[in-house]
């Protein structure tokens, strides 16, 4: 055993010497590939990760249509028109409270008065919930408003829903008053593009 | 043999005494203890390294269940240097022999040190280490917009995959490929995008007029599970990778975070039944939903199945968020391992990457589920969250 240990130590010393300037080529050298190490064990060679796709609006090489920020589903959003009718929710709930019915009635009336308009309902959450859970909860809140509006006579085909989860708080605070403000549906009136 | 006993620590003597007369292979069984959160780290010493190589080795080994002690107290001694290139050896003090001796050339010191750490992990545990793996995640700015990033598992060498200034979420790797699905609001609506990182090309994968989010590529890459709300609820859907054969799998009132079992047979997800948040699973080709019981872990969301099929990690919410792990077969209740959310398994099913809040900004962290040793990774930009470990 002593002999083995001495042999081992000598071997280790030899390798260390090799790495620290000895002219002899080390016996057990692992050359690493240049560029980015492949993240995946099954990658046969080391691919170089490009700095990320760049979008070229002129050529659109990636096949993704460019959306104008002024358009939603091909329509012009009016965020001010229904801003007063934002509705709020209890914690972890997508149930529309009775106190919000008058706001929903106002939204329904606005849609009735403008048959060419459509509606976008944006569901939002407070920060107490995991990200993807909140994305589903926010969607549920937006869908709850669509169901309620349908009961008030609004054609659900005129209502788009979108969830922002907790990514678009109305109040950046971290207390109960901020959370109350953030658990909400915002209503965005959509007008047809002129000439369409 | 007498000499060995003299240089061994009392704890090693105890192990050795029990195993005296047995082969070395049986002694190494002590490394196979896999008690969640309660396994003793393997004591190692690290000498000769400084600077970046030392910090990489310390980080990599710490989050894989090794503890740093003096050479006298070490079960394994790591010696070497990083002058020029990384070179080092690993000595098993119990067996009194050098079990690894290697030099590395090429790229940079970080990559060489990661490679050496991987060789150390393999020499001691017989399992592939995580030193050369990648993660994807979202990095969010204060206005809510962000980008999808890819980096080494320790947060270094980060590259932005998107440059959209849009809300993004939930990157999901296609196993075995340099490709990601993720959610982006680039086109205003939350849509699911697919980016091939080797070509830089990307396309929209799902863009129904309501919400499309939470993509998860199947283990063989042939299918994608996701949440769509086109039928009036956020439901779990599955489609082929070419977008064909879209099928709704659930009709729960509020489903989220689908993930695949490693055999591709099941999709686990978070749901809500009678007002209670629960984990559940559904056959990937359709069928009855089964509840996954998470006794003692309220409000479970964000399940992630380990690649070896043994574990399910998830986030519980009992006030704050906590990372929990339970056996996939339900044979034991969940173990709470760390404060945080959004766990994702390493390819070797031993380590989790997740995010946790530090002064209201999310930071990525890496956790060895057996020893509970945990360390934050380098911050990339803003609030870093929803990590996905490349497999």
Image (spheres, coloured by chain):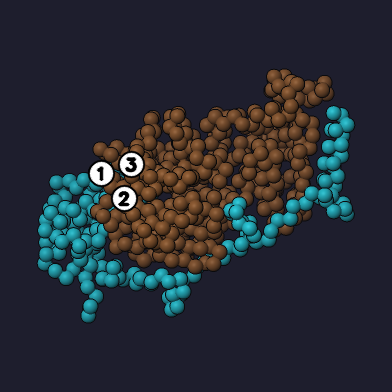
Chain colours: A cyan, B brown
Q: Residue B235 shows which numbered tag?
A: 2
- Local packing at callout 2 (Cα closer than 10 Å; few below 14, some 14-19, many 20+) is many
**Whole-Å distance between the Cαs marked 1 and 2?**
17 Å
Task: Respond whether the residues carrying marks 1 and 3 are from the same subunit.
Answer: no
- The residue wearing badge 1 is A93
Q: Nearer the viewer, residue B322 or A65?
A: A65
Q: Nearer the viewer, residue B218 or B105?
A: B218
Q: Residue at x 32, y 57 (%)?
A: B211
Please identify, in this view, whether the residue under mark 1 or under mark 2 is nearer the observer: 2
Q: Residue B289 shows which numbered tag?
A: 3
Q: Residue at x 52, y 49 (%)?
A: B389
Q: Is residue A151 left or right of residue B251?
A: left
> Are the two marked residues, 3 and 2, in contact with CB atoms closer than 8 angstroms?
no
Q: Is residue B372 left or right of residue A111?
A: right
Q: Position of residue B115 (x, y in %)?
A: 68, 49
Q: Taking the image as drawn, is residue B268 in sight?
A: yes
Please identify, in this view, whether the residue under mark 1 or under mark 3 is nearer the observer: 3
Task: Respond whether the residues carrying marks 3 and 2 are from the same subunit.
Answer: yes
**Whole-Å distance between the Cαs marked 3 and 2?**
12 Å
Q: Residue at x 48, y 45 (%)?
A: B263
């Amino acid at each position: 055993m002593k002999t083995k240990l001495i042999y081992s130590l000598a071997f280790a010393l030899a390798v260390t010497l090799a790495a620290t300037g000895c002219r002899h080529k080390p016996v057990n050298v692992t050359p690493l590939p240049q560029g980015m190490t492949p993240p995946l064990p099954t990658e046969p060679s080391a691919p170089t990760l490009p700095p990320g796709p760049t979008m070229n609006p002129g050529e659109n090489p990636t096949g993704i249509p460019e959306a104008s920020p002024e358009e939603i589903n091909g329509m012009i959003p009016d965020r001010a028109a229904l801003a007063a009718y934002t509705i709020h929710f209890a914690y972890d709930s997508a149930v529309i409270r009775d106190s919000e019915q008058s706001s929903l009635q106002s939204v329904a009336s606005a849609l009735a008065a403008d048959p060419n308009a459509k509606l976008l309902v944006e569901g939002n959450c407070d920060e107490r919930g995991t990200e993807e859970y909140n994305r589903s909860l926010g969607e549920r809140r937006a869908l709850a408003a669509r169901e309620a509006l349908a009961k008030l006579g609004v054609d659900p085909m005129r209502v788009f829903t979108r969830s922002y989860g907790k990514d678009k708080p109305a109040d950046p605070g971290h207390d109960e008053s901020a959370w109350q403000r953030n658990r909400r549906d915002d209503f965005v009136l959509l007008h047809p593009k002129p000439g369409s | 043999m007498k000499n060995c006993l003299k240089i061994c620590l009392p704890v090693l003597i105890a192990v050795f005494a029990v195993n005296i007369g047995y082969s070395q292979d049986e002694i190494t069984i002590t490394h196979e203890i896999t008690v969640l959160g309660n396994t003793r780290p393997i004591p190692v010493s690290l000498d000769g390294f400084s600077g970046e190589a030392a910090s990489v080795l310390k980080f990599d080994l710490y989050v894989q269940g090794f503890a740093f002690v003096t050479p006298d107290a070490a079960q394994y001694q790591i010696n070497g240097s990083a002058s020029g290139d990384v070179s080092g050896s690993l000595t098993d003090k119990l067996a009194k022999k050098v079990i690894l001796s290697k030099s590395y050339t090429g790229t940079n010191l970080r990559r060489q040190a990661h490679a050496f750490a991987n060789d150390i992990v393999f020499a001691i545990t017989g399992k592939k280490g995580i030193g050369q793996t990648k993660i994807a995640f979202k990095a969010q700015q204060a206005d809510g917009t962000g980008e999808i990033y890819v980096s080494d598992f320790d947060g270094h060498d980060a590259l932005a995959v998107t440059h959209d200034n849009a809300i993004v979420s939930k990157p999901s790797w296609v196993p075995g490929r340099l490709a990601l699905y993720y959610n982006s609001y680039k086109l205003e609506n939350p849509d699911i995008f697919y980016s091939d990182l080797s070509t830089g090309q990307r396309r929209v994968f799902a863009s129904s007029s309501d919400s499309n989010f939470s993509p998860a590529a199947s283990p063989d890459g042939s299918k994608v599970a996701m949440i769509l709300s086109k039928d009036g609820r956020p439901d779990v859907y599955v489609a082929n990778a070419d977008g064909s054969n879209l099928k709704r799998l659930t009709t729960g009132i509020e489903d989220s975070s689908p993930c695949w079992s490693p055999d591709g047979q099941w999709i686990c997800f978070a749901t809500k039944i009678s007002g209670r948040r629960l984990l559940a699973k559904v056959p990937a080709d359709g069928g009855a939903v089964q509840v996954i019981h998470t006794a003692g872990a309220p409000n479970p969301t964000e399940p992630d199945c380990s690649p070896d099929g043994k574990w399910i990690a998830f986030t519980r919410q009992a006030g704050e968020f906590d990372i929990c792990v339970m056996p996939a077969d339900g044979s034991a209740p969940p173990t709470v391992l760390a404060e945080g959310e959004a766990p994702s398994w390493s390819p070797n099913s031993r380590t989790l990457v997740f995010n946790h809040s530090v002064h209201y900004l999310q930071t990525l962290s890496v956790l060895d589920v057996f020893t509970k040793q945990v360390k934050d990774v380098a911050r990339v930009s803003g609030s870093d969250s929803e990590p996905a470990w490349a497999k």
